[in-house]
Image (cartoon, helix red, strand yellow):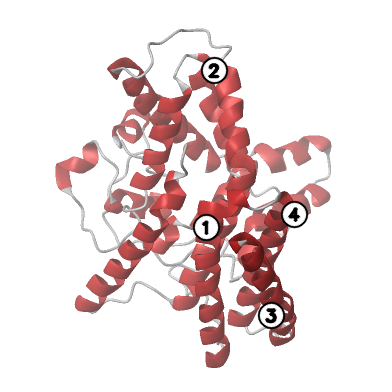
Amino acid sequence: MPNLIALAIPFFFVGIGAEIWVAKRKQRQVYRLTTAMTDMACGIAQQLVGVLVGALSLAAYAWVYSHRLIDMPQKTWVSWTAAVLGVELAYYWWHRLSHEVNLLWAAHSVHHHSEDYNLAVALRQSVTTWLPMLLFYLPLAVLGVPTLEYAVVLGLSTLYQFWIHTELVPPLGFIEKWLNTPSLHRVHHATNARYLDKNHAATFSFLDRMFGTWEPETERCVYGVTKPLDSYNSLYAQVAGYVDIARMWKLAPTFCEKLKVVFWPPGWQPPWLPVAALVTLPRTKFEPDTDVRAKWHALGQFTLLIIGVFCFLMWGGALTKAEQAVCFVLFAMTLFSTSALIESKRWAWKVEGARLVVTVPTVALLLLGFLH
């Protein structure tokens, strides 16, 4: 089955371009270059990990489906309806618990780090959410939702969520009682006290109304997380939540307290933990000074990276396992190096120089091998 997300990548960038154009016409700034690059870098990392685990995840679902408890006629309105409602319900509870359980939040928080809100944020994803999400979807296989219907509906649900990451679409009135919209999802990404842990739906907002987590947009949203990441490093963003858990685990005085570190809500503040400084909202967005030359060089390299990753996702199956591994290493090096450049790290240019020395001849050899 084709990777729907990979196929949609060109359309994602068309949408981002259109959003920038509309924002300019409205004299609004909804993008910051460095933040948008970090958002997309997280998405690149997630898609690359998806190459490794995507087939495994689908195979796991198909295996469980082969041991299903209920037989459902395939490719009928019954199976498609069950897939749509089942995927939505499973997503809702995975998403809701990802805001209520610290271990799940460590993965999902990657998507919420951005202090901007635009279509690029939709691409900012975690490399570790695939496993807990799969565990929430497997009951559908047990109940007989066919693998094809599950995979197609899951892909379409993911694509639907792209367009709701924008500030440029106003509230849509009665539609929001049934469907998830940009206004409702802005609330979900906001750190305003009244908005925390609201609007968890993927496509159908009536589940939020059913379970008491629906909240309309009534005040200006302030985006990000209550404990800001303050970094452009897309690789660090993927592990920052787990690093926080590890630090708290080490400080916890008893095993029971250690378990609470993992399974209690993210906002839990135990008495044995030093009180963290409160973040005053709205706060100044994280935007350290970046050398102009470094910024534009990083943008150029990042553009080449996007092209390379798209080609890899579409045609990388023709490469040998060793060649694929080399590509993964080059992609990771580029993600690390570009983030160091836009953060103006003292050693950034040395790392970038070393990366270019390795990358240029390696890419040339890979292209020659692929063409032959």
Vertical arrangement, residue 74 with respect to residue 255, above or below = above
Name the residue carrying label 3.
356
Residue 230 percent across, percent down from the top left:
59, 70
Q: Earlier in the sequence, mark 1 or mark 3?
A: 1
| Mark 1 → mark 3, Cα distance in angstroms | 23 Å
Please name the residue shown 54% across and 11% down the image: 68
Disc tally is: 4
Query: What's the residue type where badge 3 is placed?
Result: Leu
| N-term-proximal mark, 1 vs 2 | 1
Residue 322 tag number: 4
How packed is label 4: few (under 14 Cα within 10 Å), some, or many (20 or more)? few
Q: What is the three-letter code of the residue carrying label 4?
A: Ala
The residue that label 1 is drawn on is 43
Asked whether, in this view, residue 271 is left or right of residue 16, the answer is: right
Give SS at disc 3.
helix
- Within 10 Å of disc 1 (Cα), the crowding (few <14, some 14-19, many 20+) is many
**Quadrant showing the C terminus:** bottom right
Q: Return the residue at label 2.
A: 65
- Of circles 4 and 1, which is in front? 4
